[in-house]
Image (cartoon, rainbow, N blue to C red):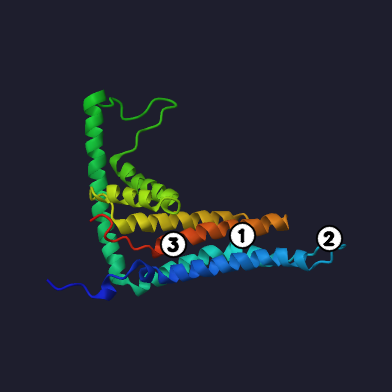
Amino acid sequence: MTAPHPLETPARRRRHARLIATLAELIGDCANAAGTVYRPIANAAPEQGDVPFNLLPIVVLGAAAGPRLDAARQEDAARWPDAVAREETEGQRTFEARCAAAEADQVLVDAVLGPVEDDLPGPGAIALPTASQSAAMALPAISADFLASFLDDPEAAIGLVKAATSTGEFTVGQILDDAVDTAVLAGLMILRGLQNPTDPSAAAETCLMATRQFTQAVIVASADLADVAV
């Protein structure tokens, strides 16, 4: 059997190179935007009262960050079409495995508690998720757990990945990619509140808060744990 060409199985930092580069640029842009607030304060005379601010860079940054990241993702996908196709195939396979696991869990619950007789829940009741819904919710849950512990306790995070991938319901790449999405979305949600800033200091601090999420996204997007589940 012929081994795949290296370009067909890129390292994660190459597979997501445009996204990583754009995130790194956004981190710098956030710092620069915050500087447009802090620098005038630093340059003002000690006896000066009101200090004029230019909040336009912060507003523009908040509006442009999402489209910039979307464009970077599209560029990465266009550069690595074989990797994208492989990821889609793996995604279908592991989703089916999670559905099968959810169905097996439901059979076990029914055996212990008895099947639910009514298809529709009563007033005020919440319907239990279907097997496919449970499968869809499983990936964000495990990736969120991974992201929460990755920086502070990498060994625990890697343990989560090992356990999750051992059943065939996830791949390492899926967990890492979803964790990147979570971190990126968190950063974008922070910046989203900057469309109509009224407090210059709060706007600057918001920009700096977003950099933590974008930095975490860069670290996870660059992480290559392909052999972690072996």
Specify the amino acid type for callout 1.
Cys
User: Which mark sits nearer the N-terminus, 1 or 2?
Assistant: 2
Residue 77 horizontal side relative to residue 24, left or right: left
SS at circle 1: helix
> Image check: 212 left or right of 145?
right
Measure the C-alpha gap from mark 1 to mark 3.
Answer: 19 Å
Figure quadrant of the C terminus? bottom left
Q: Quadrant of residue 37?
A: bottom right
**Closer to the N terminus: mark 3 or mark 2?**
2
Position above or below: 162 against 13: above
Q: Quadrant of the N terminus?
A: bottom left
| Residue 168 seen in the current view | yes
Of residue 162 and residue 66, the one placed in the foreground of this image is 162
Q: Are marks 1 and 3 in contact (CB under 8 Å)?
A: no
Circle 2 sits on which residue?
A: 50
**Of residues 47 and 147, the one drawn nearer to the viewer in this rendering:** 47
Measured as percent of width and height from the top left, residue 224 is found at 34, 63
Alpha-carbon span between mark 3 and mark 2: 40 Å
Q: For the view shown, which residue lies furthest in the left direction?
A: 1
Task: State the residue position of label 3.
Answer: 219
Q: Which residue is mark 1?
A: 207
**SS label for mark 3:** helix
Q: Residue at x 84, y 63 (%)?
A: 46
In contact (CB < 8 Å): disc 1 and disc 2: no
Foreground tag (3 vs 2): 3
Amino acid at pointer 3: Ile
Q: Nearer the viewer, residue 119 or 215?
A: 215
**Which element carries disc 2, helix, strand or loop?**
loop
Decide: few, some or many residues near mark 1? Use Cα within 10 Å; few <14, some 14-19, many ≥20.
many
Asked if residue 141 lies left or right of residue 5, the reply is right
In the image, residue 73 lies at what x, y percent? 42, 67
